[in-house]
Amino acid sequence: MALVDVKGVSKRFGGLTAVSDVDLTVNAGEVHCLIGPNGAGKSTLFKLIVGLYPPTSGSIFFDSIDITAERPYARVQRGMSIKMQAPSVFKELPVRQNIQVALQERLSGAERVAEEERLLSLLNLAEESGKLAGALSHGQQQWLEIGMALALQPQLLLLDEPTAGMSPEETYKTGELIKSFNAEGMTVLVVEHDMAFVRQVAQRVTVLHLGKIFARGSLEAILEDEKVAEIYLGKTHAH
Amino acid sequence: MLKLLDGPQTLGRGKIFWSCFLAVLAGALIYPLLADSYDVGNFAYFLIWIFMALGLCLMWGYGGMLSFGQTFFFGIAGYGYGVLAINMGGGTATIAALVLSVIVAMIAAGILGYFMIWGGISGIFFGIVTLSATLVLAFFLGQTAGPEWHIGPARLNGFNGMKGMDPLTVGSFDIEGSALYYLMIALIVIVYIALRMLVNSSVGNVIVATRENPQRAEMLGYDVRKYQLLTFVIGSGLAGLSGALYTSWGQFITPSSIGLPAAAMPIVWVAFSGRNDLTATLVGSFLLLFGFQTITVYSQQAALVLMGVLLLATVMLAPQGFVLGIGKLVVDWWTRRRLRDESPALADTGRLQSDET
């Protein structure tokens, strides 16, 4: 069953068409990766789905409801949760308060405190909980933002390059974390170009090129596709 | 509920802070018994302006919205009080005039704020639009000298200002002198406590988060525009409270209390005090008002120049505010000393979080 259904969406910035007539379906319960070379339109499509950009044409459905005209907060209230490409946290607030702001609509009192502790521990941020978020390393800020996104217990987790700036170990742990949440039923849409990470988490892959859908299918099928290797990997297979 | 008084958004916390608070309050309550009536009246006058400063602290320090419109709402409620008090016949009706004039200022804030916030105005443009509204009101009221400018029997009187309204009155008792002073103390305690609870509540969490990163706050499911509008209406309403109290205190109001020099004053008070903390704003604004009034006795120009110098010094030397900076130093020093007494090793590990006093 389709949780996200993007139908004929285009986005133009003046004379530049960043996304052109894209159809994309993300099924409930899958980890779906959106890949493509730089300038393919991945982040623009991501911003269209989360509501940061209005599409020039086309429609976006979430759980069969047309959300094309809705602002980001309304989409989040429907069950989306978003992590942007650059770390986007409340830098002048302590780490714990960042998590609190994300949790407070869903939980209160002792339940909220327990969930704060669980998330801080899960993200390896328990010892940093009193620090200002801006004092964390880049990778830790990425983790904190992922934690804030997870705190909403979303149906759909949207991640734009979640491992940017992370070490290989942190990247691997992030992948395992995403798989564990997916195993509990969470749908995940990831924009990523770290192929090792994509291999680790992806169940289905969509390839964007020059703002259009270039290929889609299982990870294995995409990796075997000569044309994908040509445009995405510079005629070199991903191994 | 009481936990909200000691939450993370306010610097002063714990038993020592609240003991000091009660001591200062006790001192304020016995002050009229020790001072002459002129000084008590002067103190009541200083306290009238504190609401406007606290409102700006909420909007600017906590909400990230620099409003130059505090005297716009001060003027609306100030003139509103005059018009209502005169039209309603004075006497006990002045209490209703006070409440209604503040409500009118809040409705005006709701309308102006809606168009600005839903229109996507933020940052420096928020200051420009609110300043423009303030100047428009001041210039408009300045040209209302003719007899045709009246609302019922209340004449606006142009630059000479509106006069003839009663002071706040209960029955046949005029709330002036010591009575006004005690009313100011009671209102300040109520407003200060209420604002502390607001900023430390879940709503306050979102207000501060919106200041830090509005896009992230929206992506946590909050319609940040509603929180910004709420902040703007409360902050502007407090400016309105100052305006209505000012008119009832002096029984006059002129456009000069709205214009550019007046509009800049709350910015100076709050910037100097420390816009990110209510207590720093309360203390710093009072000190500045006291100093300003004292110097004005000798030279009003010198007092205005001093305010400008203080603003420059704050921006260049202590952007977070002098009073807040000193407050943080005191809390850090106290926390380090306490921990050194309890565990010498811990105290040497570096600067400590001032979570508790």
Image (cartoon, grey):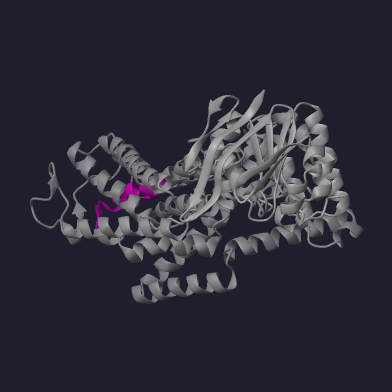
Secondary structure, magenta segment, majority class: helix
Q: Please state the horizontal and vertical placement of residue B168, each as a whole percent of the image.
A: 30, 42
Q: Residue at x 25, y 49 (%)?
A: B79
When asked about the image quadrant of residue B333, the answer is bottom right
B302 is higher (above) or lower (below) than B289: below
| Residue B209 shows in the view | no
Q: Is residue B295 visible?
A: yes
| Relative image position of residue B124 (x, y in whole percent) | 45, 60
Measured from the top left, where is residue B326 in percent x and y?
64, 64
Query: Quick one: quadrant of the N terminus of chain A?
Result: top right
Q: Which sits in the foreground, A220 or B191?
A: A220
Nearest the eye: B45 or A3 = A3
Specify whether A92 is left or right of A169.
left
> Residue sitting at 42 percent across and 55 percent down?
B126
Magenta stretch: residue B251 in it?
A: yes
The magenta-colored residue range is B238-254
Task: Where is residue A194? Give x, y as percent.
Answer: 79, 51
Q: Residue B346 occupies which quadrant of the picture?
A: bottom right
